[in-house]
Amino acid sequence: MTINYPVGTHHYRTLKTNKTRTGRTTKKVLFGKRGMGLEDEINLANDYYLANRLAVVHKKPTPITIVKVDYPARSAAKITEAYFKQASTTDYNGVYQGKYIDFDAKETKNKTSFPLKNFHEHQISHLASVLTQGGIGFVIIKFTSLNENYVYPASELIKQWQHLNGKQSISYQEIVDKSFVVSESLNPSLDYLTAVDKMLELLH
Amino acid sequence: MTINYPVGTHHYRTLKTNKTRTGRTTKKVLFGKRGMGLEDEINLANDYYLANRLAVVHKKPTPITIVKVDYPARSAAKITEAYFKQASTTDYNGVYQGKYIDFDAKETKNKTSFPLKNFHEHQISHLASVLTQGGIGFVIIKFTSLNENYVYPASELIKQWQHLNGKQSISYQEIVDKSFVVSESLNPSLDYLTAVDKMLELLH
């Protein structure tokens, strides 16, 4: 069964339609940041927060195992063999009004559920450690097909992970019920800290 | 004028002396972690803090610009061209009893001063942003020749950076006066959080 949620789709305004060489139709989006990936939107929000002294949050670099490095004369060192490494923590952390915040960002095209395979075991245990230490943990979940963004508390994620044994999916409704919606905003386009404020009011 | 500080040097116990093929004499250190780099010592301390639920602190991965990636059939993606990128933040951050901590680690062989060229401008401004946001910022400075480690508050570093215009060096005595010494310890060998506790008592 496919459920169609109309929310958000009306925000897409088609500028013009092009045919690609393979015959696929591509649409150009007129308004703003709709075509951006979640990561770009979060980076823009973090730039805005930093410039306005609201928070200091950075994305961690991609973890890599370096095997071979060349040092060409008079040039910068060049890495010629390296491999991607599985991250042992989440992608983002920082400080917000003296508090430690720690989160990951995940997007899904799925409209009815959020698959837990988006996470690794040690990301979950990292978030659990953060909560134990009094930090604020969450996930920003974007349902791309619905253009909806949620701040989903780490405590709920951990509960569901244990309940579902790290497999299967969390239902869309469960996420909506337990999350704090990131409302439409102009600058930053993804004002996730306002949703975090609501979470802190309720949970702390 | 060279000042010899005897502190710490007696901790080196020579196990045996080997001659290498080039005729250089190498010494093997008997006791513990003396031969370790500062980064290794901090990583071990962070492992200890995590396992004992005292703090969650991780080193950030080295920032890299990836240019070319090969995807060999049935193997992991292989990065074949990449370059080191200047870090825009410090190397370590995390949460300690609900508080955000953020620091960098620097070692110097120098016995009388600590050269400011160890820092980049944006590392200093990052630490300034962290302090503005109510976070705890500092640098762990190791004088390798003296085997002395200090937790030097970010507020002092920023003051000296402005005073010396990002050039020159901070004198050893200035660092000793304004820092919190990391005492000898067994496990972890570099128990920097105990020094941070002393800093918090005085500064907050």
Image (cartoon, coloured by chain):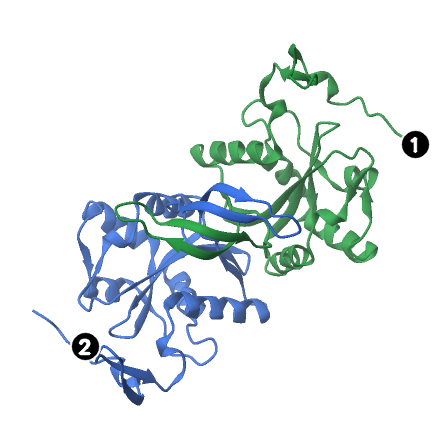
Chain colours: A blue, B green
The residue that label 2 is drawn on is A5
Out of B22 and A97, give the one closest to the viewer.
Answer: B22
Label 2, secondary structure: give it.
Answer: loop
* Residue A120 can be seen, yes or no: yes
Out of A100 and A12, give the one closest to the viewer.
Answer: A12
Circle nearer the viewer, 1 or 2? 1
Label 1, secondary structure: give it.
Answer: loop
Residue B198 horizontal/vertical position (percent): 66, 38
Q: Which residue lies furthest to the left in this view?
A: A1
Same-chain status of marks 1 and 2: no
Out of B35 and A189, give the one closest to the viewer.
Answer: B35
Q: Give the answer, above or below, for where B138 lies relative to B198.
A: below
Q: Which residue lies furthest to the top in this view?
A: B16
Residue A15 horizontal/vertical position (percent): 33, 90
Residue that appears at 64% across and 36% down: B195
Q: Give the answer, above or below, for where A39 lies relative to A69.
A: below
In this picture, residue A163 sits left or right of residue B80: left
Q: Mark 2 lies on which chain?
A: A
Q: Mark 1 lies on which chain?
A: B
The residue that label 1 is drawn on is B1
Residue that appears at 26% across and 79% down: A21
- Identify the amino acid type marked 2: Tyr
* Residue B61 can be seen, yes or no: no
Residue B185 horizontal/vertical position (percent): 60, 24
Out of A146 and B83, give the one closest to the viewer.
Answer: B83
In this picture, residue A173 sits left or right of residue A90: left
> How many numbered tags mark residues here?
2
Q: Which residue lies furthest to the right in this view?
A: B1
Residue B178 horizontal/vertical position (percent): 77, 42
Q: Which residue lies furthest to the bottom in this view?
A: A16
Q: Give the answer, above or below, for where B119 lies relative to A68.
A: below
